[in-house]
Image (cartoon, rainbow, N blue to C red):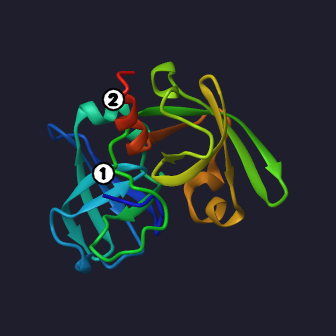
């Protein structure tokens, strides 16, 4: 489990497509000695398992199913990604409960300056729109965010300057797709209500 509070930016250093699953090697500012083999790390919102590590690098294997359902299939050497280690008992819950299981892609329709912040409007598939509510939570590329407004399959968020600079949002452009995870509680409420 994660909180959606990004603690580092990583960079794709190597892609090995010769395996049955693609292996990505990611550089990070973290000393990977503090992570166990098999640790879970949220990479651009996807919960991935550390399968190799050395110094400030770690490797993850990604299935073709995951590549087809997320933005990971577009990663290239040099791509920057949001990183968050998994929660430990007693850690601060700064965002919201995030599982690292991507539900679908949200596409940026507009980015508008608003004071020092940016307002971003995104479009999601119709089947995921029902899970998004004003003042509810959503995770985009692993970042916990509050929904401002919802109009059908389009919703808006606000990115404060700190988040803009400390995450990959600072490189976001209209037309970009982001990994989206809907709020866990919204998913269960919809299931209970039979929607």
Disc on the earlier residue, 2 or 1:
1
Q: Residue at x 48, y 48 (%)?
A: 141
Give the SS element for disc 2: helix
Q: Residue at x 38, y 44 (%)?
A: 184
- Left/right of residue 185 with respect to residue 32 in the rendered view: right
> Residue 88, image x and y in percent?
28, 72
Give the SS element for disc 1: strand
Q: Is residue 25 above or below residue 153?
A: below
Q: Which mark is residue 47?
A: 1
Nearest to the eye among marks 2 and 1: give it: 2
Q: Is residue 53 visible?
A: yes
- Left/right of residue 24 with respect to residue 129 in the rendered view: left
Q: Quadrant of residue 20?
A: top left
The quadrant in which the C terminus is found is top left
Q: Residues within 10 Å of mark 2 (few under 14, many from 20)?
A: few
> Residue 157, image x and y in percent?
66, 45
Check contact, mark 2 vs mark 1: CB within 8 A.
no
Residue furthest to the right? 115
Q: Nearer the viewer, residue 172 or 39?
A: 39
Q: Residues within 10 Å of mark 1 (few under 14, many from 20)?
A: many
Q: Nearer the viewer, residue 185 or 73?
A: 185
Q: How many marks?
A: 2
Task: Identify residue for label 2.
Answer: 191
> Residue 125, image x and y in percent?
50, 23
Distance from disc 2 to disc 1, alpha carbons, whole Å, reads: 23 Å
Q: Residue at x 17, y 72 (%)?
A: 36
Q: Which mark is residue 131?
A: none
Q: Is residue 73 visible?
A: no
- Left/right of residue 172 with respect to residue 19 in the rendered view: right
Q: Residue at x 43, y 62 (%)?
A: 10
> Residue 95, image x and y in percent?
49, 61
């Amino acid at each position: 489990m994660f909180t959606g509070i990004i603690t580092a930016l990583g960079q794709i250093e190597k892609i090995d497509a010769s395996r049955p699953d693609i292996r990505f090697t990611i550089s990070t500012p973290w000393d990977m000695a503090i992570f166990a083999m098999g640790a879970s790390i949220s990479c651009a919102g996807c919960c991935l398992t550390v399968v190799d590590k050395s110094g400030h690098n770690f490797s993850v294997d990604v299935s073709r199913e995951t590549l087809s359902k997320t933005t990971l299939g577009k990663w290239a050497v040099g791509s920057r990604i949001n990183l968050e280690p998994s929660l430990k008992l007693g850690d601060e819950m700064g965002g919201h409960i995030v599982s690292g299981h991507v539900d679908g892609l949200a596409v940026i329709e507009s980015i508008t300056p608003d004071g020092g912040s940016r307002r971003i409007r995104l479009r999601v598939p119709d089947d995921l729109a029902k899970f998004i509510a004003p003042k509810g939570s959503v995770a985009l590329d692993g970042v916990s965010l509050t929904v401002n407004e919802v109009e059908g399959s389009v919703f808006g968020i606000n990115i404060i300057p700190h988040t803009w600079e400390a995450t990959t949002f600072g490189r976001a452009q209209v037309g970009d797709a982001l990994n989206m995870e809907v709020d866990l509680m919204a998913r269960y409420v919809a299931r209970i209500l039979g929607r």
